[in-house]
Amino acid sequence: MITIYGKPDATCFGCKKTKDRFTAAGVEFVFIDITDPANAAALAYITEELGYQQAPVVVVEDQDHWGGLNPDNITRVIERFGAAA
């Protein structure tokens, strides 16, 4: 399971590009908008537990994670989970 914690596309270039790359590759993910007050626990998780201060934060199977737009990590995950994989 892949979860992307981020902000709306209009306010976060990296969030939009990360989602676009996964979508284009057929990689399924869950997106959680950390600007929504209903998701305060998710925001606390990525900032307090994982220690990130920038969006997006991508969490892969609760073991692998990174913050920010990271093309190398995105490619690695696409190779593992993509429709062609």
Image (cartoon, rainbow, N blue to C red):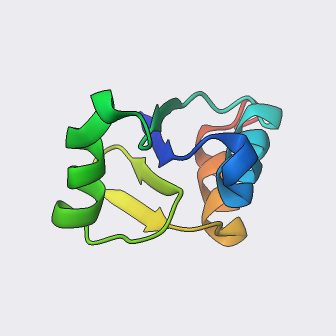
Q: Residue at x 68, y 51 (%)?
A: 11
| Position of residue 4 measured from the top left corner of the image (x, y, whole percent) | 49, 43
Q: Residue at x 68, y 70 (%)?
A: 72
Tell which of 63 and 3 is nearer to you.
3
Q: How many marks?
A: 0
Query: Which residue is at the far front?
Result: 37
Tell which of 53 and 84 is nearer to you.
53
Residue 73, compared with residue 77, is above or below; it is below
Tell which of 41 and 25 is nearer to you.
41
| Position of residue 20 measured from the top left corner of the image (x, y, whole percent) | 78, 41
Residue 61, compared with residue 13, is above or below; it is above
For residue 13, which quarter of the picture?
bottom right
| Position of residue 66 measured from the top left corner of the image (x, y, whole percent) | 45, 66
Q: Residue at x 59, y 27 (%)?
A: 28
Residue 15, compared with residue 20, is above or below; it is below
Q: Report the quarter where the C terminus lies.
A: top right
| Position of residue 50 measured from the top left corner of the image (x, y, whole percent) | 24, 65
Q: Residue at x 65, y 66 (%)?
A: 69
Q: Report the quarter where the N terminus lies.
A: top left
